[in-house]
Image (tube, rainbow, N blue to C red):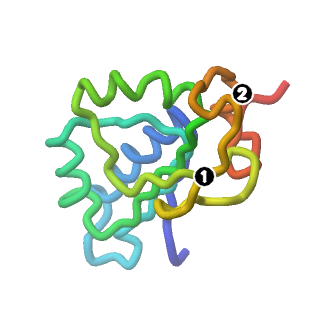
């Protein structure tokens, strides 16, 4: 094993971040696997400024932490105000992605606009990331 990557979607994204912190504190810092990577999809902002700073600067220092999100995700769109009011922050880098295609948008790029781009309402959009349906199946 040459690299450890924790990943998850929605609540699983929060679990991936917390599990990576637990992993990092349990493994020897001299191990070549001591700096896991974390990639999440549609996860919540999980912690306030103090905890976010601790995770970034201490617990997961040197780890790559990427949060993939998109504007059509109703879970993220409808909870953003609450998380902001609570002072919650992202721990790593938040990147906008396309829900239906394997594309990540840079800050300088213009994201494609749709009729519903300012109105996130369809719960299935919470389950579409980079052209892959990551939700429950029958």
The residue to which callout 1 is attached is: 111
Is label 2 or label 1 in front? 1
Looking at the picture, does residue 31 appear above or below residue 74?
Answer: below
Residue 59 percent coordinates (x, y)? 24, 56
SS at badge 1: loop
Nearer the N terminus, badge 2 or badge 1?
1
Residue 114 percent coordinates (x, y)? 70, 38
Residue at horizontal 49 percent and vertical 31 percent from the top: 76
| Horizontal relation, residue 94 to residue 61: left or right | right
Residue 54 percent coordinates (x, y)? 18, 51
Q: In what quadrant of the picture does the N terminus appear?
A: bottom right
Please tell me in which quadrant of the rendered image residue 8 appears.
Answer: top right
In the rendered image, the residue lying farthest to the left is 50
| Horizontal relation, residue 74 to residue 84: left or right | right
The alpha-carbon separation of the residues under discs 2 and 1 comes to: 20 Å
Residue at horizontal 53 percent and vertical 26 percent from the top: 75
The residue to which callout 2 is attached is: 124
């Amino acid at each position: 094993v040459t690299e450890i990557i924790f990943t998850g979607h929605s609540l699983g994204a929060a679990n991936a971040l917390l599990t990576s912190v637990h992993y990092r504190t349990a493994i020897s810092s001299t191990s070549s696997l001591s700096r896991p990577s974390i990639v999440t999809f549609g996860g919540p902002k999980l912690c306030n400024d103090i905890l976010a700073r601790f995770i970034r600067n201490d617990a997961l220092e040197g780890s790559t932490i990427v949060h993939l999100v998109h504007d059509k995700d109703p879970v993220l769109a409808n909870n953003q105000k609450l998380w902001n009011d609570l002072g919650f922050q992202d721990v790593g880098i938040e990147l906008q992605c396309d829900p239906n295609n394997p594309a990540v948008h840079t800050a300088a790029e213009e994201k494609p606009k749709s009729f519903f781009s300012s109105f996130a309402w369809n719960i299935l959009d919470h389950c579409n990331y980079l052209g892959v349906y990551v939700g429950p199946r029958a």
